Amino acid sequence: MNEFTICVEPGTPARVDGSRAARLLGVNEHDIPTLVRARLLKPLGNPMPCAPKYFATCELIKFANDPQWLDRATRAITQYWKNKNANRSSSRFTQAVEINDR
């Protein structure tokens, strides 16, 4: 199996925000809350729900080098969007039926 290692440039802080965490993990910034909800990422401290979240760089690098974690993260993100799109299409269908019934 081919193994690879993610390295960070010198001067990278030990604590990063969600946008930098997304870049380190190779996901979109809007996927970070999904990973937190799925308990695949844990923010530092105990932030309020609407507060900015910070993550430990050492944990992010460990996750980025773990194919099993990346697989679970990809599945969680895919499942989130699958459910969101299913809810959107079913609500559009319901609205279309209501309009046609008038």
Image (cartoon, rainbow, N blue to C red):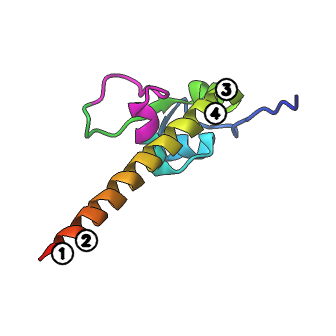
Evaluate if marks 4 and 3 touch, with contact meaning CB atoms under 8 Å apart: yes
Tag 1–tag 4 contact (CB < 8 Å): no
Q: Which residue extends farthest left? A: 102
Q: Which mark is residue 99?
A: 1
Mark sitting earlier along the chain (1/4): 4
Distance from the alpha carbon under mark 3 to that under mark 2: 42 Å
Q: Give, as a three-letter code, the residue at label 3.
A: Gln
Q: Tell me: 83 left or right of 58.
A: left
Q: Nearer the viewer, residue 2 or 24?
A: 2
Q: Which residue is mark 4?
A: 70
Rendering quarter of residue 25: top right
Q: Are marks 2 and 1 in contact (CB under 8 Å)?
A: yes
Q: First in sequence: mark 4 or mark 2?
A: 4
Please tell me the numbered disc located at residue 48: none
Going by the numbered disc 2, the residue's amino acid type is Ala
Q: Which mark is residue 96?
A: 2
- Disc 3 to disc 2: CB gap under 8 Å: no
Tag 4's secondary structure?
Answer: helix
The residue under the point 55% across, 29% down is 14
Badge number at residue 68: 3
**Which residues lie in the magenta part?**
33-47
Question: Which dot, 4 or 2, sits closer to the camera?
Answer: 2
